[in-house]
Image (cartoon, rainbow, N blue to C red):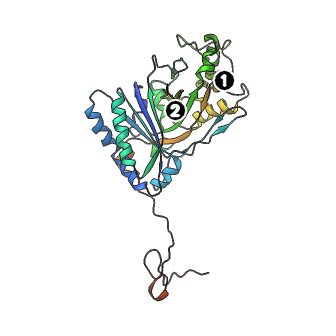
Amino acid sequence: MGEPQPILDPLTPAAIFLVATIDEGGEAVVRDLLADLPGLRRSVGFRVPGSGLACIAGIGSAAWDRLFAGPKPAELHEFPGYEGEKHEAPATPGDLLFHIRAQNQDACFELAMKLHERLTGAATIVDETQGFRYFEQRDLLGFVDGTENPEGRLAWTATLVGDEDPEFAGGSYVVVQKYLHDLVAWRALSTSEQELVIGRTKVDDFELSDDDKPLNSHVAVNDQDTLGQITRANMPFGSVAAGEFGTYYIAYAATPSVPEQMLERMFLGSDEADYDRILDFSTAVTGTSFFAPAMEFFDELPDAPAPAAVERESPGIDGVAVSGNGSLGIGTLKRS
């Protein structure tokens, strides 16, 4: 197995999430950036000792085909989106993901600026989210987030691709979404009512018993003992002036089928529940999928795909058409 990107490292107090789309003709610049990314991270991190600066890069399905020849991760595909009877999880554009995290926000911000400088003219950042640690790993709803992340060896098997796709072993599938919370409606609930929505106690973070936990609670709908394990690196974000308060959901998994099944149950329902009750207070506004390859991938990128054969004709010698490769087309004349 290749060395994974720092997906399983402990969460940090600061993070920036950048999602970008590749502009037409920007592929070569993006490839150069991906090849240089480990060095860029080291250069910035060296200037901020103790920051623990890390950057996890993910590549979307359509972008993979534009950037690389040869095989791609077996289960890589675009985020499907989910439209339930009451709530929707939209699919939004994104070719590249940069999950930057550190002990200090200045280190994250400096690397984000360097990435933007390198991408200018070749890719467009379509979403930037600055996350922060909120008290005891809590989200802005006031509940601890990420308690059920797998640990030890289980974290490796649940999060990282293994022998089932050996060329991409050590990589991980990534699903990201931004959720905006209606804190006015949420705070109108009593603490005990909030606990029934989440399925955990608020102060001490214990899961409610099966007798007390509603089937449409967030914990019950996303039961990892039944559906499988994922590693979440969620972060709160917000703007007081804009009145926006949310959670940046980011799930890493050995197969995208696990987080996708969770989202299906959340938005489309199941035999046990019509939908996840948390969606009455949290609205998904983005949704994108990526693959985060192992570290060795960036040391030696796959070849770029061959240019598409585009037949272009321009006025030639004495009226004879000249093809796009500069020849007279003799011996390869097109038949009408």
Q: Is residue 130 left or right of residue 62?
A: left
Judging by the rendered image, the residue that carries numbered circle 2 is 251
Instruction: Point out the frontmost of discs 1 and 2.
Output: 1
Question: x, y (%) of residue 198?
Answer: 61, 19
Q: Residue furthest front?
A: 241
- Residue 277's disc number: 1
- Which quadrant is home to the N terminus? top left
Query: With respect to residue 125, does 184 lie above or below?
Result: above
Q: Secondary structure at mark 1?
A: helix
Q: Secondary structure at mark 2?
A: strand
Question: x, y (%) of residue 247?
Answer: 52, 27
User: Answer yes or no: do the residues labelled 1 and 2 have beta carbons within 8 Å?
Assistant: no
Cα–Cα gap, marks 1 and 2: 20 Å
- Sequence-wise, the earlier of marks 1 and 2 is 2
Q: Is residue 252 left or right of residue 87?
A: left
Query: With respect to residue 29, does 194 lie above or below?
Result: above
Please say whether residue 275 is visible from this viewpoint.
yes
Instruction: Kindly identify the residue that appears in the image at 58 percent across and 35 percent down.
Output: 285
Residue sitting nearer the eye, 262 or 92: 92
- The amino acid sitting under disc 1 is Arg
- Residue 112, by quadrant, is top left
Query: How many numbered callouts?
Result: 2
Instruction: Kindly identify the residue that appears in the image at 59 percent across and 41 percent down.
Output: 91
Query: With respect to residue 187, does 315 lie above or below?
Result: below
Instruction: Kindly identify the residue that appears in the image at 54 percent across and 41 percent down.
Output: 289
Please say whether residue 166 is visible from this viewpoint.
no
